[in-house]
Image (cartoon, coloured by chain):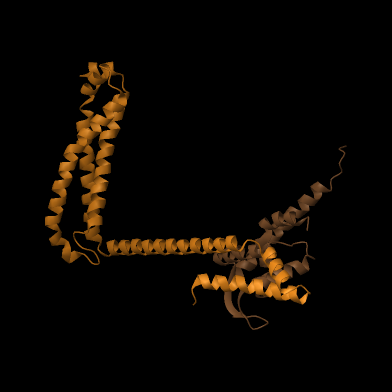
Chain colours: A brown, B orange
Amino acid sequence: MGNEPQNLELFKGSVDVLILKTLSRGPAHGYGIARWLLQVSKDALRIEEGALYPALHRLEQRGWIASAWGSSENNRRARFYRLTPKGVKQLERESSAWRRFSRAMGRVLDAPEEIG
Amino acid sequence: MKDPDSDLEDELSFHLEMRIRELIDEGLSDAEAGKEARRRFGDLCRIRAQCRQIRREGETQVKRAAYLEQLRQDVVYGIRQLSAARGFSAIAILTLALASIGVYGVIGYLASRRAHEIGVRMALGARARDVVVLVVKQAMIPVAAGMALGVMGALAGAGFLESQLFGIQANDPWTFLAVAALLAIVALAASYIPARRISRVDPKASLYQA
């Protein structure tokens, strides 16, 4: 639990792309997104789960995702989000930007400490 | 469609309930599960406020987009109307252009004739700014009188135009305001530009010129 705040900070800038990626596998409700992220990241992306919702609503307004009410696995009324065609393109753009960024970070952090 | 606030409540409480259920399945007691679910969720009040804020911003943007679309349609309609009655539009534009040129000529001439007087004022210590303000202010007196006469004349003559207009009143207040504003801007420029030029000349030069 000691490393939680760090994860939270990292998460802030990446929440959009993580949501888009999750939804590229098919429609899901907010809870489903939170669960899948935890599962796939092996609990490393343990974030404030509530923070997903402002992000989901923002993405919906940008037209990258759309929502509809449906019923959940246990027959509860739940709001399902799905990726729009615009969202698919946005996911491609953002994931390639993130890959470039993380490669660059890796190169810097793995650089030998002594110069020469 | 339900009210968006209660939709939001449903959405957030669905999440909490699902999480609580899963924690209970993992072996936590009801009370522990509730506490842990809320801890993982984060500050419910803050998240609720953020979601509402995002929705409000979205609604404002939709309204703005609708307003701009309305404006665009009005402009397109206006241009179409103007090009449908080319002769009429040409006369209207020509008249407005002639009025602007006339106002600019007369006001500009009156202002530039005051070069000598401005020179004297500046030789006596008036600052350039004061002189420009004075000239522009005094030029606005005949302009205001002319505008009052013009509005009265236009109101009187508007009846004759009624048959030529569609979708707009002959005495449409915005049209009157726009024409008056255009001529007022022309008059301001006509007095300001020569006044500023003269106020920058060396006072001695304008004194000898006279």
Which is more toward the observer, B91 or B180?
B180
Which is more toward the observer, A75 or A10?
A75
Residue B51 at x, y = what percent? 56, 64
Q: Is residue A5 above or below residue A18?
A: above
| Relative to B152, B172 lies left or right | right
Residue A59 at x, y = what percent? 59, 64
The mark total stands at 0
| Relative to B43, A115 lies left or right | right
Q: Is residue A69 above or below residue B159?
A: below
Q: Is residue B110 above or below residue B24?
A: above
Which is more toward the observer, B11 or B54?
B11
Q: Is residue B112 above or below residue B140?
A: above
Quadrant of res B24: bottom right
Quarter of the image with the C terminus of chain B in it? top left
Quadrant of res B77: bottom left
Residue B81 at x, y = what percent? 28, 64
Which residue does the image show at 23% across and 42% down from the upper left?
B101
Which residue does the image show at 32% across and 61% down from the upper left?
B79
Quadrant of res B12: bottom right
Residue A84 visible in the displayed image? no
Residue B48 visible in the displayed image? yes
Residue B18 at x, y = what percent? 68, 75
